[in-house]
Image (spheres, rainbow, N blue to C red):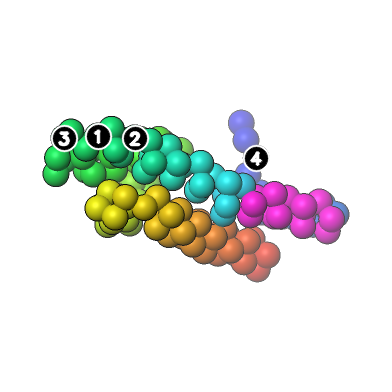
Amino acid sequence: MYNLSFDLRGYSPLIIIATFLFNFLMVSLLVPIAEEIYFRGYLLPRLSRFGFWAVPIHTILFGLFHVWTPWMAVARAIGIIPFAYVVQRKQNIYIGMIAHIIFNTLDVLTGIMLVMSL
């Protein structure tokens, strides 16, 4: 069984800072770029044969990929659908990348502030 604790007093400040920086780099930059390259750059164009339904199908697949956060499925779908339509219409993956990086960065910063306030 996992012991999830937000008590960081047992860790050195260097370890805490390194962990937060690694988390920030991965979740705020590298993961969104990789997801956008695959989902909006590779998968979405291949779903275009479904016409209007390409983006809803794409959104469902994106939600299923994030299986570890099922409580965010509705919010994620609401947030992704507009960007997927814009990326598809403009054929510009950078729009999705920038939005994804901004949303993930806000999420990580909120989590860090929450943990540090405990």
Q: Mark on residue 57?
A: none
For label 3, the residue is 50
| Residue 115 picture quarter | bottom right
Q: Residues within 10 Å of mark 4 (few under 14, many from 20)?
A: few
Q: Amino acid at mark 1?
A: Leu
Q: Which residues are magenta?
A: 13-25
- Describe residue 76's horizontal placement relative to residue 4 as left or right: left
Quarter the C terminus occupies: bottom right
Give the x, y percent position of residue 41: 39, 41
Residue drawn at 58 percent across, 46 percent down: 30
Q: Measure the alpha-carbon separation of dots 1 and 4.
A: 41 Å
Visible in this render: residue 1?
A: yes
Q: Earlier in the sequence, mark 2 or mark 3?
A: 2
Q: Amino acid at mark 3?
A: Phe
Residue drawn at 77 percent across, 57 percent down: 17
Residue drawn at 70 percent across, 49 percent down: 22
Q: Residues within 10 Å of mark 3 (few under 14, many from 20)?
A: few
Q: Measure the alpha-carbon separation of dots 4 and 2.
A: 37 Å
Is 83 or 12 nearer to us in this picture?
83
Q: Earlier in the sequence, mark 1 or mark 4?
A: 4
Q: Amino acid at mark 4?
A: Asn
Q: Mark on residue 3?
A: 4
Say what secondary structure mark 4 lies in.
loop
For label 2, the residue is 43
